[in-house]
Image (cartoon, rainbow, N blue to C red):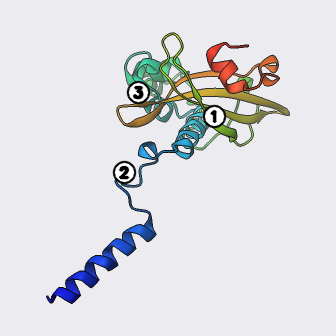
Amino acid sequence: MSRYRTTTAALLLVSVLALTGCSESGGDDRKSDDPKKAVAAVAKEWQEADHRGDYRRLCELSTAREKHGTMDQCIVFHGGATPQSSSSAASSPSAPSAPSAASGSLAPSGPDGASTGPVTVEGDPVEVPAVGKHPAGWGVMVTFTVSKTIDRYALRVVDEGGTWKVDQYTEVQGHEMSQGNPVLAALTGEN
């Protein structure tokens, strides 16, 4: 290949990479200067998994500390059944088989089976300091309706081994909404 063709090919490659947004981070939002988009997506997916009853996915999106033990222990902690208890219930002729939200046979539901609306992220993620057992990270407010009431939750999302995970979640109380930063107030107890 001639020197001209090599230089042209190299310039073309650099141009293509620049136009497609390729960077040292390989397109990974966690490595960028502004991880807000990735953090918000994890928080939203975590809350949606909770609504679907997809506790396996919820636990996959949780930090090791938030899992409360093994994957099966995490699933049980959040209200799901372990594979062992599901299979023993299925083999019992007297146990009715209930449809699961994870299988898509139930509409997403909130407390007491009330229907829930779509999960949305309210505002931009904010940096939150370490508090107690929770490391520093990002706070995200997710909202959804339960029947006709708007529920707001603050989720702490932290980098665990190069992956964004949920480490804390708490309902945002009415008095916290009147604070300068309700997410920070809910996740740190600063009122």
Secondary structure under the numbered disc 2 in the rendered image: loop
In the rendered image, which quarter contains the C terminus? top right
3 or 2: mark nearer the eye:
2
Q: Which residue is mark 3?
A: 83
Quick one: label 1 or label 3, which is nearer the N terminus? 1
Marks 3 and 2 close (CB-CB < 8 Å):
no
Amino acid identity at mark 1:
His
Marks 1 and 2 close (CB-CB < 8 Å):
no
Amino acid identity at mark 3:
Pro
Q: Which residue is mark 2?
A: 25
Mark 3–mark 2 Cα distance, whole angstroms, equals 38 Å
Secondary structure under the numbered disc 3 in the rendered image: helix
Decide if residue 152 is on the left or right side of residue 3. Answer: right
Secondary structure under the numbered disc 1 in the rendered image: helix
Q: Is residue 28 above or below residue 6?
A: above
- Residue at 68 percent across and 14 percent down: it is 190
Decide if residue 162 is on the left or right side of residue 147. Answer: left
Quick one: label 1 or label 2, which is nearer the N terminus? 2
Decide if residue 140 is on the left or right side of residue 38. Answer: right
Amino acid identity at mark 2:
Ser
- Residue at 67 percent across and 32 percent down: it is 141
| Residue 64 at x, y percent in the picture | 40, 22
Q: Is residue 89 above or below residue 27?
A: above
User: Residue 51, labelled with which disc?
Assistant: 1
Q: Residue furthest right?
A: 148
1 or 2: mark nearer the eye:
2
**How many residues crowd mark 2 within 10 Å: few (<14), some (14–19), many (20+)?**
few
